[in-house]
Each structure stands twice: as structure tokens, then as C-alpha cells.
Image (cartoon, grey):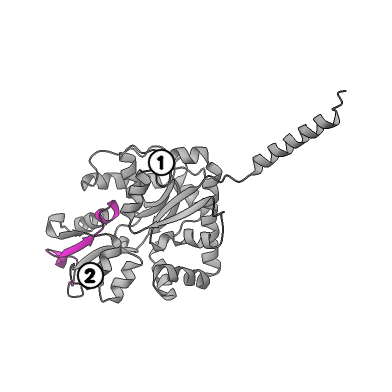
């Protein structure tokens, strides 16, 4: 039997305690998550407001447009970003190693094309000025809408404008229509615009997801998991206390609580079980990805075929 002298025993005990403490310490590597202002991303801000994660560990950064979020993510100014699935495919085409770890929402009428009231049909947009954000989503919605109505991009006059300028340009008479989404959609409808197309006509094609740089999720999987857990806690809060959640979101979005509730009618938030079905090894979202990639290539939104292999993961769930 080996007996430790008291100083050595104390030293080993201290080292053991230090090792146990280091194993339980929260990973404080800063994870920056980029978003633009969109009703479907608001549960992230609700989670932050409820302190679902340490402020020193996860930081939400809001950009004026999805285009700027995509640019910041490409430049590694962000570890994660909330993007539409078509924007993720653009990252894959650029050979940027990423993985989709969460499906935020699926658009079912929340993405729209609105126009002046005298434009009484979609085909009456022929020759009109349409505000479109210079990113994949705006181009995708417009090209899909034109295709479904037997029109082409040559039939309209495209004005590339960031989403935060759509309302002002419409009110100033600079454009006749806009490819837009909440909260700008509600603001334009309140200004007299009418809907001429919505994502209900292309069900399941517009999906918002959380994408993370591959290297970061490999090195900090628990941190990504805490972010995802906070998201689902916020969804629970939204369901259990909808008035309180809507009041918080209305301040950020600049619309009324009633309008926040109405905005949710055009969205579906998949729960944790649905996310597992969508993101698993044979996830249902792969079907959507392949369809989306084919549409983007046929509409010349991408130049080559895009591989969707290993793009989705449920490891953070």
C-alpha cells in the first residue's frame, strides 16, 4: 500500500479539483450569429432577452439586409448565420464548408410580391418597376413568380434595393412593386399596397435555416447545441405566452402586436422532432434542397450543379 505524504496528497487533490472544474467550465469562445430583420428569426432575440445563453458566449448581430449577412458569413466575420436555404446553396457552390444545424421556419405566405392597388393582377406588372434585394432570395422569389405566370425577367424593370429601402422607395413613387417580407410586407400593405404573389404558390421552397461554419461546429459542438436549445425554449415561450412574446417582438419589428400575430400565419416553425426528420442522415430537407438547386440552375441563379451531400446535420438537436 502506498501512502501519500500530506503535501503531495494536497497537491494531487488540488490538481484533481482543477481538472474537474475545467471539464465543467462553459465554453466561452464567442459565437457571433448574423441575422437580418425578419419575423422568422425573432425567437433568437426572444431567447437572448430571456438569457437562454451567456452573453459572453453567444452574440446576435443584426444586419440591414440578408445580402450583408451572407457577405459577413463568407468573410468569417460570423461563426453562424440565419439564412434562406437558397443562400446556403450559394455558399456550397463557393466551396465554403458549412452545415445546416436548425430549420428556423418554413414560409407559407410570408414572402410576397406587393404592388400598387391599380396593378390589378400579377401580369399587370409587365413593364413595371419592381424593388428586389440584391441577393438570392429576392431573385429566387421573383424568377419563380414570373415563371409560374408565364413571364420572364425581361418583362419587368428590376430595381436592386436593400430591404430597408423598399418602403421609402415605394412611398416616394420610385418603384411600383416590391419583392419583400415581414415586417416590410405589413408596412407596405398598410400604405395601400396589395399582394400579387406569395410563397403559398411555391409551398416548401422558402426555408430559413441556421448555418454554421464546419470548423466551428467541429470544435465547439456544445456551444452550438446551447444556441439551438435556446431557440426551442423561445418557441415554447412563444406558444405558452404569445401576448408577452408578441409585445417584445412588436417593439423590435416596428409593428403592432396584432400584426405580429398576423405575420405568424404565413410561417411554420418546425419543432425539435420535425427538425430531426428534416435534418437527419436521410433528412426530408434533402428533397427540398435538390429541387431548389435544380430550380436555381434552370433560372440561371447558379451556374453549375450544386452538391447537397452532408450539408444537413442533426447533431445539435
Where residue 19 appears, as percent x and y from the top left, is 69, 37
User: Going by the image, does 74 lie left or right of 210?
Assistant: left
Secondary element under disc 1, as helix, strand or loop, is strand
Where residue 189 appears, as percent x and y from the top left, is 29, 73
For residue 79, the mark is none
User: Going by the image, does 108 lie left or right of 191?
Assistant: right
Q: Nearer the viewer, residue 171 or 21?
A: 21
Q: Which residue is mark 2?
A: 170
Secondary element under disc 2, as helix, strand or loop, is helix
Would you place residue 259 above or below residue 108 in this image? Answer: below
Q: Alpha carbon of mark 1 to alpha carbon of mark 2: how far?
A: 37 Å
Q: Which residue is mark 1?
A: 98
For the question of whether residue 256 can be seen, the reply is yes
Q: Residues within 10 Å of mark 1 (few under 14, many from 20)?
A: many
Numbered range of the magenta stretch: 116-139
- State the residue at coordinates (52%, 59%): 48
Amino acid at each position: 500500500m502506498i501512502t501519500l505524504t500530506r503535501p503531495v496528497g494536497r497537491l494531487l487533490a488540488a490538481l484533481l479539483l482543477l481538472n474537474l472544474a475545467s471539464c465543467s467550465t462553459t465554453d466561452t469562445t464567442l459565437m457571433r450569429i448574423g441575422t437580418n430583420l425578419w419575423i422568422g428569426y425573432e425567437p433568437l432575440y426572444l431567447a437572448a432577452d430571456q438569457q437562454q445563453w451567456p452573453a459572453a458566449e453567444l452574440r446576435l448581430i443584426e444586419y440591414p439586409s440578408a445580402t450583408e449577412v451572407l457577405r459577413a458569413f463568407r468573410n468569417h466575420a460570423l461563426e453562424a448565420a440565419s439564412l434562406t436555404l437558397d443562400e446556403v446553396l450559394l455558399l456550397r457552390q463557393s466551396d465554403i464548408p458549412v452545415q445546416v444545424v436548425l430549420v428556423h421556419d418554413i414560409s407559407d405566405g410570408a414572402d410576397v410580391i406587393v404592388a400598387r392597388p391599380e396593378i390589378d393582377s400579377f401580369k399587370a406588372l409587365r413593364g413595371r418597376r419592381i424593388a428586389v434585394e440584391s441577393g438570392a432570395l429576392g431573385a429566387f422569389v421573383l424568377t419563380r413568380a414570373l415563371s409560374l405566370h408565364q413571364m420572364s425577367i425581361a418583362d419587368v424593370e428590376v430595381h436592386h434595393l436593400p430591404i430597408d429601402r423598399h418602403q421609402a422607395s415605394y412611398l416616394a413613387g420610385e418603384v411600383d412593386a416590391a419583392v419583400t417580407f415581414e415586417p416590410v410586407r405589413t408596412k407596405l400593405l398598410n400604405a395601400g399596397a396589395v399582394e400579387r404573389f406569395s410563397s403559398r404558390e411555391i409551398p416548401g421552397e422558402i426555408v430559413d435555416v441556421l448555418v454554421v461554419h464546419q470548423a466551428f461546429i467541429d470544435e465547439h459542438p456544445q456551444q452550438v447545441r446551447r444556441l439551438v436549445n435556446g431557440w426551442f425554449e423561445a418557441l415554447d415561450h412563444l406558444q405558452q405566452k404569445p401576448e408577452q412574446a408578441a409585445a417584445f417582438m412588436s417593439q423590435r419589428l416596428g409593428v403592432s402586436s396584432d400584426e405580429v400575430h398576423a405575420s405568424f400565419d404565413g410561417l411554420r416553425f418546425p419543432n425539435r422532432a420535425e427538425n430531426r426528420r428534416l435534418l437527419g442522415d436521410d433528412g426530408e430537407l434533402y428533397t427540398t434542397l435538390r429541387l431548389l438547386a435544380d430550380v436555381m440552375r434552370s433560372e440561371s441563379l447558379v451556374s453549375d450543379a450544386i452538391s447537397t451531400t452532408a450539408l444537413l446535420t442533426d447533431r445539435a438537436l
